[in-house]
Image (cartoon, rainbow, N blue to C red):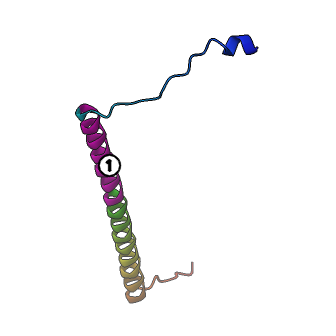
Amino acid sequence: MTNFFSYVKYSEASFPMTGQYTALLLITTIIWILLWIGYRQNKINDEIKKKEKEERINAKKEREKKLESLYPIRKTNF
């Protein structure tokens, strides 16, 4: 097993950060930030729409209760 690893030649790990890689990193970072902002804004809008929908449903129920109290259902005895 040691003979297998003896052929591995160690070298210096170097990664030249050229202008192209820097631009690619910058563009990728900007895209991720914009996606995160869009996700957050979409989540906020969903919460607002959910509240508005609940308010409309509750208002409709209140109107129905008021109408029922104004016009009670008559029970007929047959």
Q: How many marks?
A: 1
Compared to residue 29, the image places residue 10 above or below, namely above
**Magenta highlight: main SS:** helix
Residue 2 location (% of width, % of height): 74, 15
Choose between 54 and 28: the one closer to the eye.
28
Task: Determine whether the residue tagged by mark 1 lies in a helix, strand or loop.
Answer: helix
Residue shown at the point (55%, 21%) measured from the top left: 10
In which quadrant of the rendered image does the C terminus lie? bottom right
Residue shown at the point (38%, 30%) measured from the top left: 15
Q: Residue furthest bottom?
A: 70
Residue 13 location (% of width, % of height): 47, 29
Going by the numbered disc 1, the residue's amino acid type is Leu
In which quadrant of the rendered image does the N terminus lie? top right
Residue 74 location (% of width, % of height): 47, 83
The answer to whether residue 59 is magenta is no
Q: Which residues are magenta?
A: 20-41
Residue 36 location (% of width, % of height): 35, 53
Q: Residues within 10 Å of mark 1 (few under 14, many from 20)?
A: few
Choose between 56 and 34: the one closer to the eye.
34
Q: In the visual, does 10 lie left or right of 70?
A: right
Q: Residue furthest right?
A: 1
Q: In the visual, does 74 lie left or right of 22?
A: right
- Write down the residue under mark 1: 35
Residue shown at the point (63%, 11%) measured from the top left: 7
Asked where in the image residue 60 lies, by quadrant, the reply is bottom left
Choose between 26 and 64: the one closer to the eye.
26
The answer to whether residue 40 is magenta is yes
